[in-house]
C-alpha cells in the first residue's frame, strides 16, 4: 500500500472511531461526563486559579430548564454564538455560548440532570463563563473544552472529598459565601 493509501486508511479509521463515539447514557457518572465533555486536545492554558475564576469571573448562576434558540456549531474561527435559555424559574435569558459547552448542556437537559450556567458580562453582553452539570452519582462536572484539566480536576483536588457538595452550593449562595466555600480571600478595594 502506498504512503498516501496508508494515510487515507488511517484518516478513515480515525473518522470512524469519532463517529462511533457513544454519548453517555442517563446513568452516566461524573467521571463519564468529564471524559465525554471536558477533554482537552492541548494545554488548557493559564489564568486565574479555578476557585478565583468561579468567584471573580462568574457574576450570576442560572439553572436551565430549556434552550429556546441557539447556534451550536462553530463557524470558521468563530466559536461563540448567542443562545436563548429558559431558566428553572421561567425567565428567559440571552447569552453568548462557546460551542464546546453544548454537548454537556444538551446531555443534561435531555437526561433531566441539573445544569447551571455561570454568566459574566463584557461590554453590556452576557457570556456563559462556565457550565456546571450534576451527574446522577451527585458528582459535579464543568463540561467544555479543557474544563476537566482547568476546572474540574484542580477544584476537586483543592476541595477534597467534599468537593461535589461544595460546588453544588455555588448557584445558591452570595459572593461572600462562595468565597468562603472555596477559600478565596475577599478582593481589596
Image: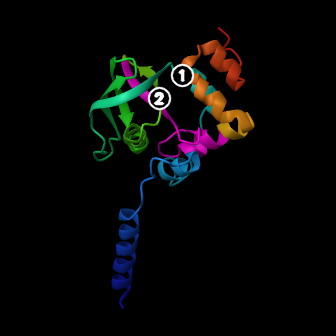
Q: Is residue 49 visible?
A: no
- Left of 48 or right of it: where is 76? left
Farthest residue, direction top: 189
Q: Residues within 10 Å of mark 1 (few under 14, many from 20)?
A: some
Residue 80 place in picture, x, y as percent: 35, 36
Which residue is identified by label 2? 116
Task: Quadrant for residue 111, please give it.
Answer: top left
Q: Is label 1 in contact with label 2 (beta carbons under 8 Å)?
A: yes
Of residues 4 and 164, the one nearer the viewer is: 164
Relative vertical location of residue 136 with respect to residue 130 in this rendering, above or below: below
Mark carried by residue 171: 1
- Left of 44 or right of it: where is 122? left
> How are the residues colored?
rainbow
Residue 25 place in picture, x, y as percent: 45, 51
- Specify the quadrant that holds the C terminus: top right
Q: Is residue 92 visible?
A: yes
* Residue shown at the point (33%, 45%) measured from the top left: 77
Residue 14 place in picture, x, y as percent: 40, 70
Q: CA distance from mark 1 to mark 2?
A: 8 Å
Of residues 189 and 138, the one nearer the viewer is: 138
Residue 132 place in picture, x, y as percent: 51, 34
Q: Which residues are magenta?
A: 125-154
Relative vertical location of residue 176 with respect to residue 1 in this rendering, above or below: above
- Specify the quadrant that holds the N terminus: bottom left
Residue 138 magenta-drawn? yes
* Residue shown at the point (32%, 41%) measured from the top left: 78
Q: Secondary structure at mark 2?
A: strand
Amino acid at each position: 500500500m502506498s504512503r498516501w493509501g496508508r494515510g487515507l486508511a488511517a484518516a478513515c479509521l480515525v473518522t470512524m472511531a469519532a463517529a462511533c463515539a457513544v454519548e453517555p447514557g442517563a446513568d452516566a457518572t461524573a467521571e463519564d461526563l468529564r471524559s465525554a465533555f471536558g477533554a482537552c486536545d492541548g494545554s488548557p492554558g493559564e489564568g486565574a486559579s479555578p476557585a478565583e475564576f468561579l468567584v471573580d469571573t462568574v457574576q450570576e448562576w442560572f439553572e436551565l430548564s430549556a434552550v429556546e434558540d441557539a447556534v451550536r456549531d462553530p463557524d470558521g474561527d468563530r466559536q461563540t454564538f448567542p443562545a436563548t435559555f429558559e431558566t428553572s424559574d421561567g425567565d428567559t435569558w440571552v447569552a453568548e455560548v462557546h460551542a464546546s459547552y453544548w454537548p454537556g448542556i444538551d446531555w443534561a437537559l435531555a437526561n433531566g440532570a441539573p445544569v447551571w450556567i455561570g454568566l459574566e458580562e463584557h461590554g453590556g453582553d452576557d457570556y456563559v463563563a462556565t457550565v456546571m452539570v450534576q451527574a446522577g452519582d451527585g458528582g459535579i462536572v464543568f463540561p467544555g473544552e479543557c474544563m476537566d484539566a482547568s476546572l474540574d480536576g484542580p477544584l476537586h483536588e483543592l476541595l477534597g472529598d467534599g468537593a461535589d457538595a461544595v460546588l453544588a452550593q455555588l448557584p445558591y449562595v452570595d459572593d461572600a459565601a462562595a468565597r468562603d466555600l472555596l477559600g478565596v480571600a475577599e478582593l481589596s478595594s
